[in-house]
Amino acid sequence: MFEQAFRNIDDVLRKEAGCTTELDYTEQSSWLLFLKYLAGLEEDKATEAALDGKKYSYILDKPYRWETWAAPKGKDGQLDHNQTMVGDDLIIFINQKLFPYLLAFKARATGPDTIEYKIGEIFGEIKNKIQSGYNLREIIDHIDELRFRSQTEKHELSHLYEAKIKNMGNAGRNGGEYYTPRPLIRAMIQVVQPKIGERIYDGACGSAGFLCEAFVYLTNKDKLKVADWQVLQTRTFYGKEKKSLAYVIAIMNLILHGIEAPNIIHTNTLAENLADIQEKDRHDVVLANPPFGGKERPEVQQNFPIRTGETAFLFLQHFIKILKAGGRGGVVIKNTFLSNTDNASVSLRKLLLENCNLHTVLDCPGGTFQGAGVKTVVLFFEKGTKTRKVWYYQLDPGRNLGKTNPLNDDDLAEFVKLQKMFADSAKSWSVDAKTIDQTTFDLSVKNPTGGEEIIHRTPKKIMEEIAALDAESAEVLENIKALLL
């Protein structure tokens, strides 16, 4: 049922003049999903308070609650069409009353970790792009079909929302900015092994994929106590995000995974001066895929000991600084970081090797990130001890990765297994830190076995890959045609 509702919502949004891309579809459905979720949360809390003989103080005033303006019901529990706004009346209410009311919450919230602050922040960043009050009414009716009550319902909704984020990531050449392949994230988490009670951080959290998957990993542990759930809800997951749309999606994604008031701050992480980070600000685990290729202004670069315009290099300094002593990191970065000869790259590799134990480098093939078109590596390190040995693994799924043939969990199973023992194989090897050039600190991936095992593909396998590439090309052409019409 939920899947059909999501399809119906997107079908209506495709007819809407104000929404033209997958990014718009995700953004517009997100603010409506959030308000529907908030209505269910308030209803549950009101019921709990009543059972305890207490009165619940609602966050939203009655005229702005979902059941008042979006889905007023009659005594029979059905939509009361006499009270239901539609057309221009609905658009005027949304744009001139509801959004300004919700935006005002930010100013009176007691802190950024409250649901009130999240309400104000979200509705300060998002604008209603749905111009037709009739389309909006149809979308609201579909949203109203959704329920967020049970863990099963939240689980199903979180999967559907993740699919929307994936489609959004695949929609343009900036796909990697919004979507890190979940199999890669899950493998990184298995290497870093976060524990309940540790603070997990992503300072460039995008759609919060790392934090959501870490939540799934920790909640799959046996025999969680009530206190454990409380720690997971309030004192485990922390993120920062600069871009408005990504911030809103991150909040909604974490909510759908089961975290009521996510600790996500809408800010430019790199605007923080590294010298201002204190012990209370530090975290046990960093998991991140910071944006690369960006160019930061000189005033931002001044916040860092190693000054460079490359966004990802500034983020790596931030992550090293914000980890506690003994903290662990798993960070995706462009593979050219390993061998660039500019002063910033050399200095940053020196800092990493001398201040952290860089124990593992995962070399990812091209096509890992849909639409990003760059090769990446994942750096795994522990802060506070010098690097003695680096274990490399050259990921080779034995096929070309693409939109119709993406990375999967099986592709990373051998990496996860061998990494536990730092075992040598045709795809993995170790390098003693003493042999690393002490002037360039070059960390290039150079497989001493001469490369990967030769994989002889059968004619059937070759034909299947050609067919997959043809299908991908056909889809791209159809998308281009659709844009031109």
Image (spheres, grey):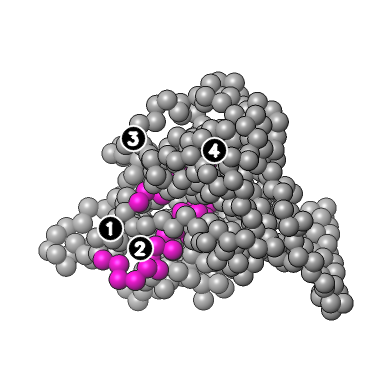
The image position of residue 454, as x and y in percent, is 80, 66
Q: Earlier in the sequence, mark 1 or mark 2?
A: 2
Please, is residue 54 above or below residue 321 in the view? below
What is the CA distance from the residue labelled 2 to the residue labelled 4? 49 Å
Q: Amino acid at mark 3?
A: Glu
Position in image of residue 124 (x %, y %): 46, 39
Q: Is residue 209 magenta?
A: yes
The residue pinned by badge 1 equals: 230
The residue pinned by badge 2 equals 40
Real-space Cα separation, disc 2 to disc 3, in angstroms: 38 Å
Considering only order in the chain, which callout, 4 or 1, is on the residue closer to the N terminus? 1
| Cβ atoms under marks 1 and 4 closer than 8 Å | no
Marking on residue 197: none
Residue 306 covered by magenta stretch: no
Q: Nearer the viewer, residue 458 or 89?
A: 458
Residue toward you, 388 or 134: 388
Residue under the point 32% across and 73% down: 75
In the visual, does 72 lie left or right of 362? left
Q: Residue 389 placed where, x, y %?
A: 55, 47
Give the crowd class for mark 1: few <14, some 14-19, many >=20 residues within 10 Å.
few
Q: Residue 217 appears in which quarter of the rendering?
A: bottom left
Question: Which residue is tagged 3?
Answer: 279
- Residue 353 - label: 4
Going by the numbered disc 2, the residue's amino acid type is: Gly
| Of the pair 409 and 149, the residue shown nearer to us | 409
Q: Secondary structure at mark 3?
A: helix
Where, quadrant-wise, is the C terminus in this rendering?
bottom right
Give the extent of the magenta segment.
Answer: 198-225
Lower sequence index among marks 2 and 3:
2
